[in-house]
Image (cartoon, rainbow, N blue to C red):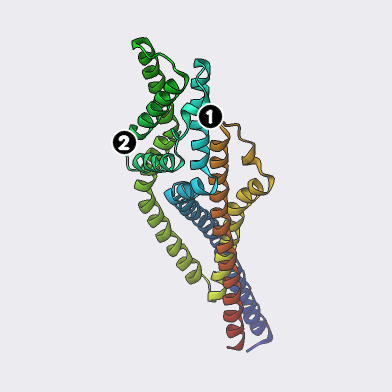
Amino acid sequence: MSTQEENAKNHGSHKHASHNHGSHKRRRRMRHLVSLILSFLLALCITSFLVLVGCKVGIFNTSVLLSQLNKTNYYENISNAIRENVGDIIRPTGLPDSVLEGVIDDDRVYLDVKATIEASLENKEYHADMTYLEQTFTNNIDAYIKKEHKLSNASTQAGLKKLLNEIKAEYIRLLDFPFIKYFVKYQAMYDKIFLPAAGGLLVVIIVLCFALIKMQRWAHRGIRYISYATLASVIMTGILPLIIQLSGAYKRINISPKYLYNLLVGVISSDLTVFLYLSLGCILAFAGEMAVIKILKDRAVEH
């Protein structure tokens, strides 16, 4: 073979190798770009899934609401509010506070408030038994009239009956928990979409993870893209709740009375904590992915 032919052959070989190298580089760039896009979509899916779970476990969780009722002394505060408002009702009449002694019973208020809320959560109505309140108030009035030697006539009885009805109306009014009907309504709506939405997202997450791993020559590279998505989900899920929790912005809501404010603040704080725990779970998952990547990478190097 002549020198000219040999040079031409070598030139062709170099050109072919250069073409293969360039083609491989383009494919690798394209694979990297597609992997980043899939990783971004995976991050959105994981974040959406965590938000769905967070709302289910926190915002629309009846147990959270009921636990905060106890933690914020809601029942005791309602009892005190009833006692104070009923006192305001009788003072203009000139009757002494002694006529209200034993009328508002803390244990009965607790049971009535609890029963009212539980009934509302089941879309039912609860009617408090007013017998004890009526008898106690009537007995106190009779004792007061007898002690003070007051005269009782039809007009007096009519006035006392009207006064008793006002007391009963105030008692029933304060038993009612504001916003509970809206909570039940939106909880029912959320429950209908939760399983289909969460299930669908979970399937997509699994498919994306599988695709990212299969697209790479080495499994640890695919898991690295999954770890990117996990870390992004930590940021998207946890940063905002963390900022709100640390700044205490939710404590600046303007709502009264005080016992209702304390309850809502307690519920919001509990909900934020749920999202922070979910973010912590993602951080642990990210740490686990890093460990798996190292193990698989070391195995690849050995082979």
Amino acid type, residue under disc 1 in the picture: Glu
Q: Residue at x 65, y 87 (%)?
A: 2
Mark 1 Cα-neighbour bin, 10 Å: few <14, some 14–19, many ≥20:
few
The image position of residue 230, as x and y in percent, is: 56, 62
Q: Compare residues 15 and 147 and report the one nearer the observer.
A: 147
Cα distance in 3D space between marks 1 and 2: 26 Å
Name the residue type under label 2. Glu
- Say which quadrant the C terminus sits in: bottom right
Compared to residue 130, the image places residue 61 above or below, namely below
Relative to 39, residue 242 above or below: above
Q: Write down the quadrant of residue 283 in the picture.
A: bottom right
Q: Is residue 193 above or below residue 33?
A: above
Residue 241: % across, % down: 60, 49
Name the mark nearer the viewer: 1 or 2. 1
Residue 38: percent from left, percent from top: 52, 59
Nearest the viewer among 46 and 72 is 72
Q: Quadrant of residue 105?
A: top left
Q: Earlier in the sequence, mark 1 or mark 2?
A: 1
Q: Which residue is mark 2?
A: 125
Q: Which residue is mark 1?
A: 84
Residue appearing at x 53%, y 29% in the figure: 84
**Front residue of this view, candidates 28 and 9:** 28
Is residue 274 in view from this perspective? yes
* Residue positioned 59% across, 62% down in the render: 280
Helix, strand or loop under label 2 = loop
Q: Nearer the viewer, residue 128 or 298?
A: 128
Where's the N terminus, which quadrant? bottom right
